[in-house]
Amino acid sequence: MIITDKKILACVDQSDHTDSVALAAMWAAQQLRTPVELLHVLDRHLETAHSDDRSGTLGVDAQDILMANLSNEDASRSKMAREQGRLFLSRLRQNALDAGLTGIDIRQRHGTVAGTLADLAPNASLVIMGRRGERTASTAPNREISRSVADIIRTLPCPVMLTPAAFVPPTKVLLAFDGRSATRDAVRAVASSGLLKGLPIHVTMSGKPISKPTNDSHKQLDWAQALLADAGFEVSSTYVPGQAAQVIAQQVNEHNADLLILGVGTHSPLHQLLFGSKTVDILRAVDIPALIIR
């Protein structure tokens, strides 16, 4: 459920996904009328990654001198990283203020992204982050999703939006639906939230290759469509034979969707899809933001 009395937490770094995450956060804040916190995590491993240990090849006195120098270099690098992060966050905050938003906070912390989000996510209505972070942004293919991001979204209790390198406010939504409790909860969450208010939604259900949906499938689609329509959405639905991963990618292209919604639960096939190898295949195939609702 997307709760509007909590803040939006936008996880930013200095990768090529940062502006996309910030834009998505500004859009979501306008939709939900919710404050935003821009979060930048300084990873100590990254700060010291370039320090080479050459002490084993030196004498005792030289080792002491070298280690002192390396310690000073690490301290200087850490200070520079903090200052760069502060300036970087200030720029993003000013961009949001210039766009007319208020209630924009910034936070910079040392640690790991996973650990920091585990601490902060319970107080967030929505977490927004890029498909991949600073470590892999320059080397990974454009549609790749880093393993660390996949691990993070698996554990967070609140909805998570993943953004590609470019973000534009969505105009058409595709909701992947299988009739199970997790995707039914996603339908309820969308219906009760203002995040997607005014956007048309197409509900897609996949299944065995049959000529038409079974009575149960038809009833499930009717339920989802009716609930969303009652909430004021323009909604359509379809049953498409085939494997879920292939069907979702096909339907995103066919309906020109620019936001994908996945409802994920512990025992749902979509859960296995999302956090198994097929999920990565889906998100590689659809270069659009994905909203993951647990």
Image (tube, rainbow, N blue to C red):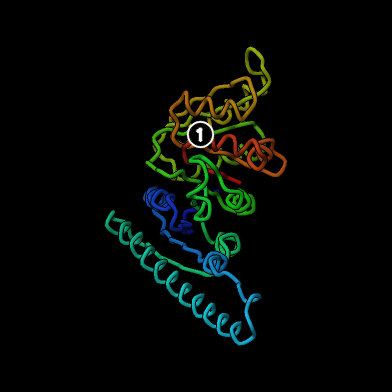
Residue 289 drawn at (x, y percent):
47, 41
Residue 240 drawn at (x, y percent):
59, 21
Residue closest to the far top: 211
Q: Is residue 99 left or right of residue 22?
A: left
Q: Nearer the viewer, residue 68 or 94?
A: 68
Q: Nearer the viewer, residue 6 or 206?
A: 206
Residue closest to the far bottom: 61
Label 1 element class: loop
Residue 262 drawn at (x, y percent):
57, 39
Amino acid at circle 1: Val
The residue under the point 51% across, 75% down is 74
Q: Is residue 39 left or right of residue 59?
A: left
Kindly indicate the quadrant of the structure image that contains residue 170.
top left
In the picture shown, does residue 99 fall above or below 171? below
Residue 113 drawn at (x, y percent):
56, 61
How packed is label 1: few (under 14 Cα within 10 Å), some, or many (20 or more)?
A: many
Kindly indicate the quadrant of the structure image that contains residue 258.
top left
In the picture shown, does residue 216 fall above or below 90? above
In the picture shown, does residue 80 fall above or below 283? below
- Residue identified by numbered label 1: 286
